Amino acid sequence: MALYIQQREQNTEAARQFNEVKRQRAGTNLDGGYNYIKLARMAYYVNKDEYLDTLSKHIAELKIEQPIRASEV
């Protein structure tokens, strides 16, 4: 979350692209094909592997525009 906020504050292309993906995929189901019971308390259930894979891809895309710090050189 902090990485996204930092990129958004810097108005980077990665943040703009992430915002567009968020808008396009707002209704995307991350249940991994599981048929969870339709209960209010299960409305936010996701498949862990599907969720972590999607999250990792977004983090990698945001990190592309991270400035290199002097300590990393």
Image (cartoon, rainbow, N blue to C red):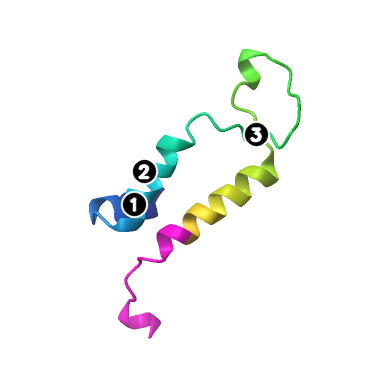
Q: Which residues are magenta?
A: 61-73
Rendered image: mark on residue 33: none
Q: Which residue is mark 1?
A: 15
Dot 2: what SS? helix
The kind of residue tagged 3 is: Val
Dot 3: what SS? loop
Q: Is residue 55 left or right of residue 19?
A: right
**Which of the two discs, 2 and 3, labels the residue nearer the N terminus?**
2
Q: Position of residue 7 (x, y in %)?
A: 31, 55
**Which of the two discs, 1 and 3, labels the residue nearer the N terminus?**
1
Distance, label 2 to label 3, CA atoms, is: 21 Å
Task: Please check the rendered image and state whether residue 51 is part of the magenta-colored stretch, yes or no.
Answer: no
Above or below 69: residue 66: above
Q: Quadrant of residue 30?
A: top right
What residue do we see at 42% from left, 63% from top? 63
Depth check, mark 1 against mark 3: the one in front is: 1
Q: Which residue is mark 3?
A: 46
Task: Please check the rendered image and state whether residue 66 is part of the magenta-colored stretch, yes or no.
Answer: yes
Above or below 54: residue 45: above
Crowd band around label 3 with a 10 angstrom C-alpha radius: few (<14), some (14–19), many (20+): some
Residue furthest to the top in view is 39
Rendered image: mark on residue 19: 2
Dot 2 and dot 1 residues touching (CB under 8 Å): yes
Distance, label 1 to label 3, CA atoms, is: 24 Å
Q: Position of residue 18 (x, y in %)?
A: 40, 48
What residue do we see at 41% from left, 48% from top? 1
The kind of residue tagged 2 is: Asn
